[in-house]
Amino acid sequence: MRDFLINLERDGAKSLQAQLREVLVSAILSGHVEPGEKLPSTRHLSQQLGISRNTAVMVYQGLTDDGYLRTSERSGYFVNETVLEMGMYQAAKASGVTVPDDAVEPIDWSEKLVKRPSRQSNIKKPRDWRSMPYPFIYGQPDQSLFPITDWRDCVYKAMGKKWLDEWSQDTMDNDDPMLVDQIRNRILPRRGIFVGEDQILVTLGAQQALYLAASLLIGPQTRVVVEEPGYADARNIFALRTDNIASIPVSRTGLPIDERLAGADVVYTTPSHQLPTTVTMPTEQRKQLLAEAQARDFIVIEDDYELETNYVGKPLPALKSLDRAGRVLYVGSFSKTLFPGLRLGFVVASPDLISEMRALRRLMVRHPPTNNQRSTAFFLSLGYYDVFVRRLHRAYKERWTQMGQALADFLPQADAVRGMGGSSYWVSMDGRVDTDLLAKKALESGIFIEPGSVYFQGQDRRDAFRLGFSSIDSKMIAPGIEKLAAIAKVT
């Protein structure tokens, strides 16, 4: 049996025998002692706990009589597999197995929780998606494209003795200065953003940036405007702070700028590639949004989640690059470009807001892992990032083109939004197909698609879905969509 502490109170109200029995029953029912596992001998147990051997014998015999243990001749006592299969106190009690009289019911957490995020509608993805022949999954990497040798070189450099002090110590609320410098001088200028170091905070992915912003800017009375359809995670983060969330249906140019923004305190938008439709907001419309923010006194959160994937013309400058009043909070991420498991993002905002976000982050995680920060900084500074982005761009553009053609060939009746880039297509069936049902049937044929209902708040829309192409082999795109179209016809 694995070692675990057994504490017996010598002067307690319960006898040593009752206490030992309760500890062993709890360990068995909770699974800390595995089915079929051998328990210590009564001699060893009595020596370990400082009790009489007779006490240990009586406890073991009692548990054997009640079905918790079984004996094997000349081998000792073992956990009875059938008892452990019941799993919990309630199951053991319901099935007639003797439970100590003073055992207590576990706490009912539903009466204690003030928030229930598990009940929110969330994006779900199968863990075994790599085994599927047609994984049209969004946000997952194609491992064949990733420069593992270059990344390993950066990790090796970061782990060197020369940089030991940089990543091994607790830096409190500070970020790796090398990574901040790379973000400031290599990443942000590509988006037209030029800021000082005090306007950048490294985060554990874009989600932490959004959570920090929501914690500081959103209260119960705050009115938040989001896009419809829109990013479910952002909407759910905001919903933990306020019920006053208004969704505005997007057009072919993104978030409309009109009277529906009246009364907003915070506006969340994805102007470069609207999530999930991928449409791009024109520069003039971005200027209108900033003018409205100034006139109506609201804050804009710009989520630039796919800042390196543009296939038609030159990428437009980020909304933040046009911001002169400091009203835009810009969120970026390395997780989408490099790999999701890296969990590194960043936020750009006015120094006062960054200072508060830094203080709040310190209370949560202090700072993102410094070894990951330094490895990423090397990846940027040595030019590996630029080479990798160009490789991704070529591969994604090819898949984007192939998917667009396949949708035109096999699903001509669908409205497939063709934006300026991104790594997915948004496909609307205009009420003809229940895409929740389509996704389930497609999965049976090894085709994964994301049903679009999770992206809607104000409408019950089940006629759209999302097709990602970041991780699927280009040769499998057309056959997969052809099969999907056949399934859609009978759904």
Image (tube, rainbow, N blue to C red):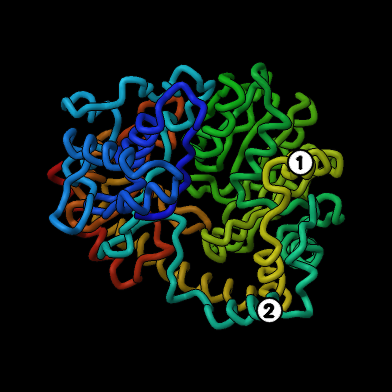
Look at mark 1 in the image and give the residue it sits on: 357
Could you tell me which residue is drawn at 68 percent across and 79 percent down?
Answer: 383
Relative horizontal placement of residue 241, taking residue 146 as reference (left or right)? right
Q: Which mark is residue 96?
A: none
Chain-order first, disc 2 or disc 1: 1
Look at mark 2 in the image and give the residue it sits on: 383
Dividing the picture into quarters, in which one does residue 344 lie?
bottom right
Could you tell me which residue is drawn at 43 percent across and 76 percent down?
Answer: 144
Residue 109 in percent (x, y) is at 45, 23
Could you tell me which residue is drawn at 22 percent across and 50 percent down?
Answer: 78
Mark 2 or 1: the one toward you: 1
Residue 9 in percent (x, y) is at 50, 32
Instruction: Using the image as rendered, state which of residue 270 and residue 31 is in the foreground.
Output: 31
In this rendering, the answer to whether 278 lies above or below 391 is: above
> What residue type is disc 2 on?
Gly
**SS for dot 2:** loop
Relative horizontal placement of residue 185, taking residue 395 as reference (left or right)? right
Relative horizontal placement of residue 255, taking residue 111 as reference (left or right)? right
Does the image show residue 104?
A: yes
Q: Are marks 2 and 1 in contact (CB under 8 Å)?
A: no
Dividing the picture into quarters, in which one does residue 323 lie?
top right
- Give the quadrant of the C terminus: top left
